[in-house]
Amino acid sequence: AESADNLDEVLAATFGIAARPGGRVDFTGFMLAEPRVVVTDGWNLERIGHNGRVEVVTQTGARLSCAVLGRLDNNTFGPGLLVPPATLMMAGLRLADQPATAGTAVHAAVASSVRRAVLEGVMSPAAALAQGLIDADTADQLQRQLKAPRPGDEWRHFSLASGQVSRPGPVRVRIQPIGFVDDLAGLRLASAPGCSGAPVVDAGFAVQGFIVAGSVDPGRPDSYMLPTAVWAAPLRQFMRRQR
C-alpha cells in the first residue's frame, strides 16, 4: 500500500476524533497504510466501547462516521482501532521497522492547535497568551474571531510539533487520572490540546509511536508516546483475525 513520504501527507493522514457526532474533537488518530486501519489512543475509546461509533474529522473539515473496530489489550493505551471510512483514499502511514534511539528527531501530527483550542473554548486567548503559547497579535486576532465566529473556523487548525526522543524506554510513568503506565518512551516535544493519539514520525515519515500524554508548555516540553515496537505485532495479529 502507498505510504506517506512527506509531512503534508502525514498531516493528511491525521484525523480529529469526536466522541459525539457534531461534537468537539477530543483526541487524534491516524491512518495506517498496512494494515489499512485508523489507530488512536485506546484509553479514550474505553468509554465508547466495542461496536460503538465516533466521528473522524479530516484536515479539510469533513466529518465522517466511523465504527470502533476494537482495542488491543496489551497496554492501557491499546491502541484503539477504527474502521476507515471507504471515502478516505489518502496514503496511510507506515510503521517503523526499528525503534528510535535517544536524540532521534521526530514530528507529531496533531488534529488540533492552540488556536483551535481557543476557538473551541478550551482556553481563553488571555490564558494562552499568559502561558506563552501565542503572541499578543494572535491573541487579539482570536478574540475578534470569537466575537464574530465563522462556521468551520475551528476545524482548520491541525498542527505539527517537532522535537526529539529523550528517553527511548521502556519508561514507567504516572499519568493522571490513570496511574502508572509501563512501556512508554519520553519525548522532548510540546504539542497542543487534543494531541492524545497523535502519530509520532521520524525523518523517514515512519510511525515511531503515538502520543499518550502531551505537554503544551514550551518551557516544559515533556511528552510521552506508546512506541510502535510495543503494539505493532499485536496489531497485525488482531487484524489477521478480522479477515
Image (cartoon, rainbow, N blue to C red):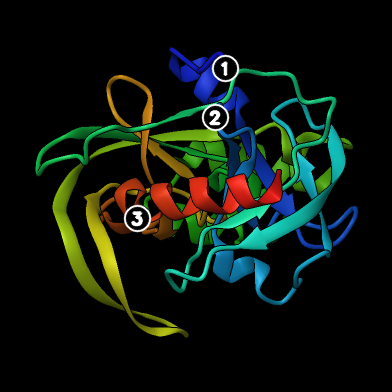
Residue 175 in view:
yes
Residue 34, numbered circle = 2
Left or right of 14 on screen, residue 207: left
Q: Is residue 163 above or below residue 25?
A: above
Secondary structure under badge 1? Answer: loop
Left or right of 123 on screen, residue 94: left
C-alpha gap between disc 3 and disc 2? 21 Å
Q: Residue at x 83, y 65 (%)?
A: 52
The number of callouts visible is: 3
Residue 76 x/y as whole percent: 46, 74
Residue 1, numbered circle = 1
Identified by mark 2, the residue type is Glu
Secondary structure under badge 3? Answer: strand
Q: Is residue 212 above or below residue 242?
A: below
Query: Would you say the residues marked 1 and 2 are in contact, meaning their CB atoms lie under 8 Å apart?
Result: yes
Residue 45 x/y as whole percent: 66, 67
Q: Which residue is mark 3?
A: 225
Identified by mark 1, the residue type is Ala
C-alpha gap between disc 1 and disc 2? 6 Å
Viewer-proximal residue, 207 or 138? 207
Q: Residue at x 35, y 47 (%)?
A: 228
